[in-house]
Image (cartoon, helix red, strand yellow):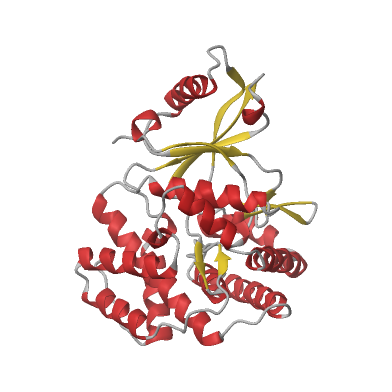
């Protein structure tokens, strides 16, 4: 299914909202505007004029790309709504639609939270803004990174302290099986993806993951699965929200810590070779500060953290290859050759497994 043009999204979304709200004269106070970010989704911000109470205020529509399973939207909506009810700053879902015929993919309408990404501006380092801008961003960076690490760790610690039972109940009520939100389910799904790819190195990596699983956590936590500073919203130095819940997993807290480290360690940097060591060093410093802030309040098994890094690296590599095979489907930064090299190197360094992929 071809993506729906932005202008058509505005028209089709309004028609759907009018039907759902039973308000034929409902209109926009703020027409949908595309929001950057999201490799699996297309995101728009908007607001309605004189809507019913449940659709009042600033809103977001998050549209899943057509080749993804619509159950992902159901899971995200259930998770976000459950966490919001527990007082965690996740955007509650107002409406969920799993019919891709409406907007070109399953979607949900949710609250738009205040604040800006905690690492706003730092993405210029990844996307290739010009070396001059990058150098300006690096001025006084140690102070900025220290504060970022504290807010980052607090967001994760606060999430891990929540009881997962309420989230699981919401997921069950949405008709989702444990395979959709447990590590066991994630590992099984990865195995099916790898089987479909026919890559011997990835098959060996999957066998390693099966053979080296850490013991089950005595007290599983709600794990975001991709909790880096671009998915944390902040205002005046304080966290105001956490977004992008598509990888949420009920698992050992080490799963989340490992996934976080993996995301930062394999971010490709579009910079001159002379600047790479400096920026890589700053990212390692940021990770060290984050781990230090987190570790002061909660201990995690270091072996398990390394294991879950391997899982995330293998998942990213398999996902990039799968998206490439689908054709025309974006795979984010992990589709880039530099990112693949980083993933392959990290898998080998942490597990000893050699993986190769076609350029």
- Give the answer, above or below, for where 128 lies relative to 347: above
> x, y percentage for residue 43?
51, 39
- The answer to whether residue 340 of the structure is visible from this angle is no
> x, y percentage for residue 279?
60, 70
Residue in the image at 73% along x and 80% along y: 296
User: Quadrant of residue 152 in the image?
Assistant: bottom right
The foreground one among 294 and 272 is: 294
Residue farthest toward the top in the current orientation of the protein: 25
The foreground one among 285 and 312 is: 312
Q: Describe residue 49's horizontal placement relative to residue 36 as left or right.
A: right
The quadrant the N terminus occupies is top left
Residue in the image at 68% along x and 54% along y: 88
Q: Describe residue 9's horizontal placement relative to residue 278 as left or right.
A: left
User: Quadrant of residue 27 in the image?
Assistant: top right
Residue in the image at 71% along x and 46% along y: 115
User: Quadrant of residue 138 in the image?
Assistant: bottom right
């Amino acid at each position: 299914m071809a993506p729906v043009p932005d202008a058509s999204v505005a028209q089709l979304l309004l028609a759907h909202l009018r039907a759902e709200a039973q308000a034929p004269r409902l209109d926009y106070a703020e027409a949908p505007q595309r929001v950057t970010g999201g490799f699996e989704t297309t995101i728009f911000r908007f607001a309605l004029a004189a809507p019913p109470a449940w659709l009042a205020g600033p809103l977001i529509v998050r549209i899943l790309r057509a080749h993804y399973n619509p159950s992902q939207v159901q899971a995200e909506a259930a998770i976000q709504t459950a966490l919001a009810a527990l007082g965690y700053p996740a955007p509650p879902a107002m409406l969920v639609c799993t019919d891709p015929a409406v907007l070109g993919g399953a979607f949900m309408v949710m609250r738009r939270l205040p604040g800006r990404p905690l690492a706003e501006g730092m993405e210029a380092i990844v996307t290739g803004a010009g070396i001059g801008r990058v150098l300006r961003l690096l001025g006084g960076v140690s102070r900025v990174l220290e504060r970022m690490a504290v807010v980052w760790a607090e967001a994760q610690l606060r999430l891990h302290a929540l009881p997962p039972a309420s989230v699981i109940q919401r997921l069950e009520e949405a008709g989702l099986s444990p395979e959709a939100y447990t590590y066991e389910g994630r590992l099984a799904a990865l195995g099916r993806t790898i089987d479909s790819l026919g890559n011997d190195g990835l098959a060996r990596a999957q066998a390693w993951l099966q053979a080296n699983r850490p013991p089950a956590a005595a007290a599983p936590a709600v794990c975001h699965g991709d909790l880096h500073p671009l998915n944390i919203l902040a205002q005046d130095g304080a966290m105001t929200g956490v977004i992008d819940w598509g990888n949420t997993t009920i698992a050992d807290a080490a799963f989340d810590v490992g996934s976080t480290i993996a995301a930062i360690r394999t971010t490709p940097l579009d910079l001159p070779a002379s600047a790479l060591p400096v920026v890589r060093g700053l990212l390692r410093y940021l990770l060290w500060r984050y781990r230090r802030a987190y570790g002061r309040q909660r201990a995690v098994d270091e072996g398990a953290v390394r294991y879950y890094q391997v899982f995330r690296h293998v998942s990213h590599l398999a996902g990039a290859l799968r998206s490439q095979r689908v054709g025309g489907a974006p795979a984010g930064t992990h589709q880039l050759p530099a990112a693949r090299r980083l993933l392959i190197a990290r898998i080998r360094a942490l597990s000893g497994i050699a993986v190769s992929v076609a350029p």
